[in-house]
Image (cartoon, grey):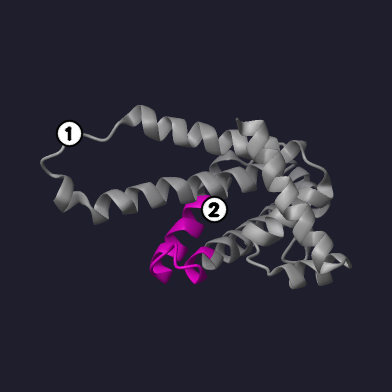
Amino acid sequence: MNYLNISGQELNLLLQRAKDGDSQSFSKLSAYIRQISYSYYLSKYNQKRIKNLDDVDDLTQNVYLSFAEQYQIVNEPEKWLRRVLFLNFVRWYKSEKNKTFSSLKENLPAPDKFSEAADIIDAERVLNLMNTLSEEKQEIVKLRFWGDLKFNEIAEKLNKNEAAVKKMFYRTLLELKEKLE
């Protein structure tokens, strides 16, 4: 899959060069990580899931810092990035939700940490199941959810019929749901 005109293969090559000590590759890869992260979180902002652009910047910076700390142990940058983007957003979303309602919850017991852990585990299960899908199915789901593309835009990008893209998307969601149950 391509992110902002860079393929997963190019990400892998840049990562390998960065691990070998090529600072130019590290800088270039870091810039791509920031662009991809910013694009992802900006799409969440456009969906009204993130309320202000400062949070978009903060989330982007968090992903970059995670990358800078972990790039030597990352093996598949595309999967790593997908996981970190998603989990970073989930963590942020939950903390924002707690901040919003903290005045109402002052007299309530502390939130159930097991429930939060279960949500993260469920998110990881979904990501792992996504990796079992065909490349085509993965790309359609990613473009729809992460790219915020409409079905006609996805169809155009993949040179497919819009009805076929819709059908594959909904069948894929059912397939994921069945595997989760």
Residue 174: percent from left, percent from top: 68, 43
Q: At 50% across and 49% down in the image, what residue appears?
A: 65
User: What mark, if any, has residue 109 been given in the picture?
Assistant: 1
What kind of element bears circle 1? loop
Quarter the N terminus occupies: bottom right
Quarter the C terminus occupies: top right
Camera-side residue of 165 and 46: 165
Camera-side residue of 33 and 4: 4
Q: How many other residues sit within 10 Å of disc 1, few (<14), some (14-19) or many (≥20)?
A: few
Q: Give the residue number, with chain letter if any, for mark 2.
A: 64
The residue lying furthest to the left in this view is 107
Magenta includes 56? yes
Residue 141: percent from left, percent from top: 70, 54
Earlier-in-chain disc, 2 versus 1: 2
User: What mark, if any, has residue 174 been given in the picture?
Assistant: none
Above or below residue 113? Residue 175 is below
Q: Disc 1 marks which amino acid?
A: Pro
Q: At 51% across and 59% down in the image, what residue appears?
A: 60
Q: At 71% across and 40% down in the image, what residue appears?
A: 175
Residue range highlighted in magenta: 44-64
Residue 177: percent from left, percent from top: 63, 39
